[in-house]
Image (spheres, grey):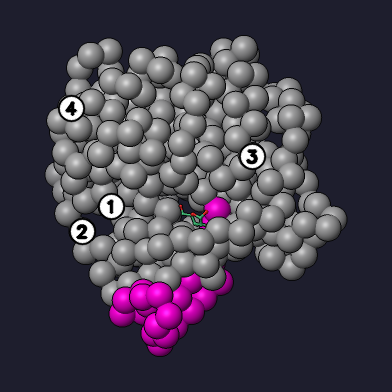
Amino acid sequence: MGNKKARILVVGSINMDLVMNLERSPDAGETVLGYEYSYIPGGKGANQAVAAARINGDVTFCGHVGDDSNGNILLNDLNDNGVDISYIKKDQGFQTGLAVIPVEANGQNRIMVFPGANHSITKEDVDQALERDYDAVMLQLEIPIEIVFYTIERAHAKEIPVVLDAGPSMKLDLSRLKGVYIISPNETEAQALTGVLVDGDKTALEASKILAKETGAQYVIIKMGDKGAFLYEGGNYKMFPAYKVRAVDTTAAGDSFTAAVAVKMAEHGHVEKAIEYANAVGAICVSRKGAQPSLPTSQEVAKFMLEKGISN
Ligand code: RIB
């Protein structure tokens, strides 16, 4: 694709994240005091869209927000980040998606999501957005699953590569994912999809084989947190170790990783280079607070890679 921008359609969720920083999350029936809280733009779909736009993707979003103040804030935020919001609808009678996220001192998070308007996306919305041409379609699992299946089917029929970030974790009929080009779950998501407890190379390989066979995906890329990313392609596999950084908040690290893979694959199609770049994006993301504020620009990624001595 040379220097042309990768044209990416994201069909996905948009949430306001209510984030509280605390030493540790409470046990059942326990109260724990936090240090601070903030409202931060998030949602797996919107995070991927912003991540892709910050590294020079030409990004269009298909999704829904509620007709409320959070919806307005999040639409403006996407627009300010250069994402085309013309296929985002405002729903009367639904609230904008909300995520409640306690972030512990070690950067670990837990995420509770109220989907709200994200669950009113329709097949017609997808058809309208797919009237344009794209180099890739990015999906996650925070919208109705029938819309995910439908988008895969429609994009595949138009010969547009589909990149599926398989979060949040759920069991699925894998045969309904036929047509995906890249499937990228984290360890928990891979376990939910395959029944294999993924905790190292051997089990990642086992899960990858199932995912590749059942979905027909050309690439399976399992995100394994601070261990790195595991690539499986046509019977071959390779682990790409994560770059070492101090984890402040892991929110959106997986989203940004997959978005970076999608953009780089659309730009040049070299999967190993795409994963190395995506590992850098994910590493920068975990070293900063919040979902979208933590997503790096292409200049920041270039600086990080230079400092780490990675040529890409
Ligand atoms: O992947 C992180 C995201 O998951 C958060 O931004 C939250 O909104 C949930 O969708």
Label for residue 25? none
Let me know if residue 116 is in the magenta part: no
**Would you say the residues marked 2 and 4 are in contact, meaning their CB atoms lie under 8 Å apart?**
no
- Give whichever of discs 1 and 3 has the lower sequence position: 3
Amino acid type shown at disc 1:
Ala
Q: Report which quarter residue 39 is drawn in.
A: bottom right
Tell me the element at label 2. Answer: loop
The mark closer to the camera, 2 or 4, is 4
Q: Which residues are magenta?
A: 19-43
Horizontal arrangement in the rendering, residue 21 relative to residue 76 (left or right): left
Give the labeled residue for mark 3: 144
Q: From what the image shows, is residue 200 above or below residue 136?
A: below
Find disc 2 in the rendering and name its residue.
245
Looking at the rendered structure, the kind of residue marked 4 is Lys
**How far, Cα to Cα, is label 1 from label 4?**
19 Å
Q: In the rendering, which numbered label is found on residue 283?
A: 1
Measure the C-alpha gap from mark 2 to mark 3: 35 Å
Q: Is residue 174 left or right of residue 120?
A: left
Q: Residue at x 62, y 12 (%)?
A: 157
Q: Nearer the viewer, mark 4 or mark 3?
A: 3
